[in-house]
Amino acid sequence: MDASEVTNKAQQVIEHPWVKRVARLGYISNAVLHIMLGILAIAVAAGSHAEADQGGALGAIAKQPLGAVVLWICAAGAVLLGIWSVVQALLPHPRKLKRLKLAGTGVVFLLLAGAFMQFAWGGHSDSGKSTSSFSVALMQYTGGRALLVLIGLAFIGVGVYFVYRGVTRRFLKDVDASSHAGLQKTMTISGVIGYPAKGIVLAAVGLLFIVSTVQGDPKESTGVDGALKAVRSQDYGPTMLILLGAGLLAYGIFLAFRSRYDSMDS
């Protein structure tokens, strides 16, 4: 069997309807994560000292009845979507930008799967401390300060892109529920609210990277948890944080819909 035959076989496998259905479970995993993040953000706005980041969200899930089962299911879904995306990226594709996006999606979901597995096994991690330690370590190297600023700019860039997708409703290109008018409207509303909220959170993380680096205090760069708590410390911060939490909940709801109605186009 030559390379072209292998490629064709791989294409047939990942394009099989059942393979796509199983891969969609990854969006459920991401939905669960963002819904919990939204709940934690609202709790922080109310004065809670909870960790409003990935580690805090996964830890909160683990503490629930059957939490480990939920985490294992989410891990499986993230692995499946990650593998599906990576395989898609490795196959010939007419649009290089699409391949790059698929590769990035694959890596993100495989890393997310690892985090789900870690907590499902009973482990834990502090995302804020990990981010802070990474920033401090990187600052010790020549060019580390510049790299941290670039990382911050990258987060801001991705955040702006999320806001853009939400405002322009470009996310609707990824889903198809045109035969259900009411459902289509619900998905549109959740996406219009959710994408900008997600983007603002990412941009806040990037801004925290830049500010802490410029001020020479990289340990203050504590990821999503630090960014959300920085928002809370501002004028009208609790109100803004409640809105962001609600937006993250909306984004999670959109992802849940996406698990069913994503077009999964290659």
Image: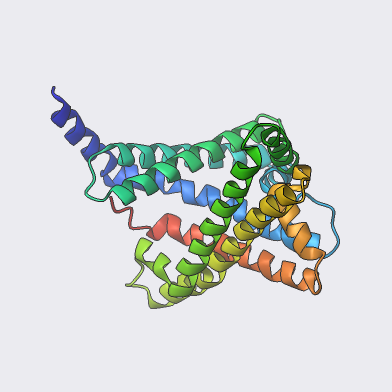
User: Is 143 on the left or on the right of 186, as rendered?
Assistant: right
Percent x, y of residue 21: 36, 48
Q: Residue at x 59, y 42 (%)?
A: 147
Percent x, y of residue 190: 53, 70
Pick whichever, 257 or 65, lies toward us.
Answer: 257
Compared with 195, 215 (above or below) is above
Q: Residue at x 68, y 64 (%)?
A: 245
Percent x, y of residue 114: 57, 33
Q: Is residue 86 visible?
A: yes
Q: Is residue 36 visible?
A: no
Q: Residue at x 66, y 42 (%)?
A: 145
Question: Among all residues in the image, which is located at the extreme front?
Answer: 142
User: Is 113 on the left or on the right of 3, as rendered?
Assistant: right
Percent x, y of residue 57: 69, 48
Q: How is the image coloured?
A: rainbow
Q: Residue at x 48, y 68 (%)?
A: 164
Q: How many marks?
A: 0
